[in-house]
Image (spheres, rainbow, N blue to C red):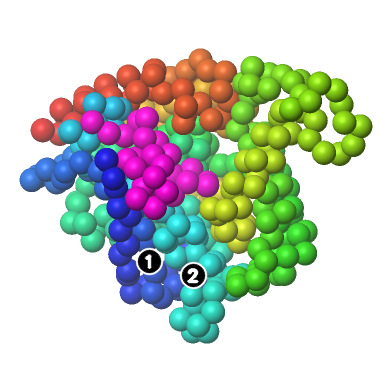
Amino acid sequence: MIVETNTVRFDSITLDSGAELAPVDVAYETYGQLNAARTNAILIEHAFSGDAHAAGVSPETGKPGWWDNMIGPGKAFDTNRYYVICSNVLGGCRGTTGPASINPATGCPYAMSFPVITIGDMVRLQRMLVDWMGIPKLLSVSGGSMGGMQALEWAVACPDRVVSAIPIATTARHSAQQIAFNEVGRQAIMADPDWNGGDYYGKQPPGRGLAVARMIGHITYMSDDSMREKFGRRLRGKENFGYDFDVDFEVESYLRYRGSQFVNRFDANSYLYITKAMDYFDLTAGRGSLGAAFEKVLARVLAISFTSDWLYPSYQSQELVRALRTRNCDVAYVELPSNYGHDAFLVDVAEQTDLVRGFLANTFEKIQ
């Protein structure tokens, strides 16, 4: 199924920093049909490097969406029953306003004059989109990793607009280690001479720095087991070491390939802004405790984590669940066995599908 990406423009948005963006564009895709009662809408939130193309085939690239194994007829997010929406986040580089967008005040790309954004800002823009679509309440909001942060923000900031939330492999706030990995990626980009203080549009982009940042990211997305199974210590196209600094091992080749591919589709400044938004995210900020943050939550919650995920380990999901239970929220939690590490929510979908399908069917039944 070919799926087109659409764009809607809003006059302005006021950010948590106090800055205003005017105008602001948001790119989105939809799958399935909105029912007459407008009660079957599900908002899918993408992770850090994702975009609005969550399912179906892109006419631009010919490739399936990043969660195509979860969204579609008969799948976890069954488009025969539900109307599924996915938008590119604020600060992104795939159709939604971000650092590469033109600043109307200057006629040039914003670059580093783009205001720093938050997960709350991303959700605020999504709410504008959902309002524009005429949808009073979402049946569910779901996503993994940074997508899970957005799902949690929806449940906390817009409790009357969300019937259920499915945060997967995520956290209420980044740990020091999670911030550290993001900072190393940012420093790799900013150390690239081609970054030029963020002013590289129309010039040579900081491809080397961005590729290194992506390589670091990919290491954290996998697990020791999955890397051992996929690569081990196998050599790449040779029988002996080269005794130089070209590629020797398969894993080196894989990381270099992933880094170079990422440079072709992602903006380095968006990397800086989005990772900073993730690091700033903290549901306890200004609320005192996680339990207090969930005080007004009305949504049913299904939290999912994976045994081999060391980037967003299960203890962070368990912390969410304990806090929700202190407020008598309707919450279920499952830790799924997987060797795929953090990437499990994207690739190890069989059990995840059964959980999500059953949870959504039960939730939908309750509101009929």
Point 27% across, 40% down: residue:
1
Sequence-wise, the earlier of marks 2 and 1 is 1
Name the foreground residue: 153 vs 104.
Answer: 104
Q: Residues within 10 Å of mark 2 (few under 14, many from 20)?
A: many
* Residue 71 place in picture, x, y as percent: 31, 34
| In the rendered image, the vertical position of residue 126 relative to residue 71, given as above or below | below
Instruction: Provide the residue span drawn in magenta.
Output: 44-73
Question: Is residue 118 highlighted in magenta?
Answer: no
Name the foreground residue: 68 vs 250.
Answer: 250
* Residue 90 place in picture, x, y as percent: 45, 59
Q: Quadrant of residue 151?
A: top left
From the viewer's perspective, is 197 left or right of 144?
right
Name the foreground residue: 288 vs 332.
Answer: 332
Question: Is residue 65 highlighted in magenta?
Answer: yes
Point 37% across, 61% down: residue:
26
Tell me the residue that label 2 is attached to. Answer: 101
